[in-house]
Amino acid sequence: MTYVIAQPCVDVKDKACIEECPVDCIYEGKRALYIQPDECVDCGACEPVCPVEAIYYEDDVPEEWTPFTAANVEFFDKIGSPGGAAKMGLIEDDHPLVQSLPPQGEGS
Ligand code: F3S
Ligand code: F3S
C-alpha cells in the first residue's frame, strides 16, 4: 500500500510534505508532486502537514480523485524507483491526468 497525492496539490505544490518524508519518496513534477508507491513506507507523516489536504492513504482517497492513485503509480513508469527525490530535483513532466486539468487554485 502507499499514500497518494491527489488533485489539491496541482498548481499549489506547497512541499511541506517533502520535509516530513523519512525516505524521500515524494517527487516533484511540473504541476504536482507524486509519491513513489514502491518507496513509500506508509508512515503517514506527510498526510497531516499538507495545507490543502491533498494526501491520502490509498484506501481513503476520495472517490472524485481515485484516478490519482493510478497517476501516482504511472508517473514512475518512465523513471522507475530512483531511490530518493532530492537528487532528482524538478522532473519536467506530469501525468496526463494532471496535464489535462485547467489551472487550479486561486482565481480559477
Ligand atoms: Fe502538494 Fe500538499 Fe505536498 S500541496 S507538495 S501534497 S504539502
Ligand atoms: Fe513518505 Fe511516509 Fe508519506 S514514507 S510519502 S511520508 S507516508
Image (tube, rainbow, N blue to C red):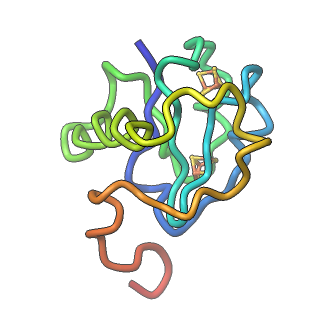
Q: Which residue does the image show at 63% across and 13% down from the upper left?
A: 43
Q: Which residue does the image show at 68% across and 38% down from the upper left?
A: 49
Q: Which residue does the image show at 46% across and 23% down from the upper left?
A: 37
Residue 70 placed where, x, y %? 28, 35
Along the viewing direction, whichever of 92 and 67 lies nearer the viewer? 92
Residue 86 placed where, x, y %? 78, 42
Single out the residue that lies furthest toward the bottom.
Answer: 107
Q: Is residue 18 left or right of residue 79?
A: right
| Residue 102, quarter of picture | bottom left
| Residue 30, quarter of picture | bottom right
Q: Is residue 96 left or right of residue 34?
A: left
Residue 97 placed where, x, y %? 27, 57
Residue 94 placed where, x, y %? 43, 59
Q: Tell me the quadrant of the picture where the N terminus can be found.
A: top left
Number of marks in picture: 0
Along the viewing direction, whichever of 43 and 52 lies nearer the viewer? 43
Q: Is residue 95 left or right of residue 20?
A: left
Q: Which residue does the image show at 49% across and 17% down from the upper left?
A: 38
Q: Is residue 7 above or below residue 44?
A: below
Q: Tell me the quadrant of the picture where the C terminus can be found.
A: bottom left
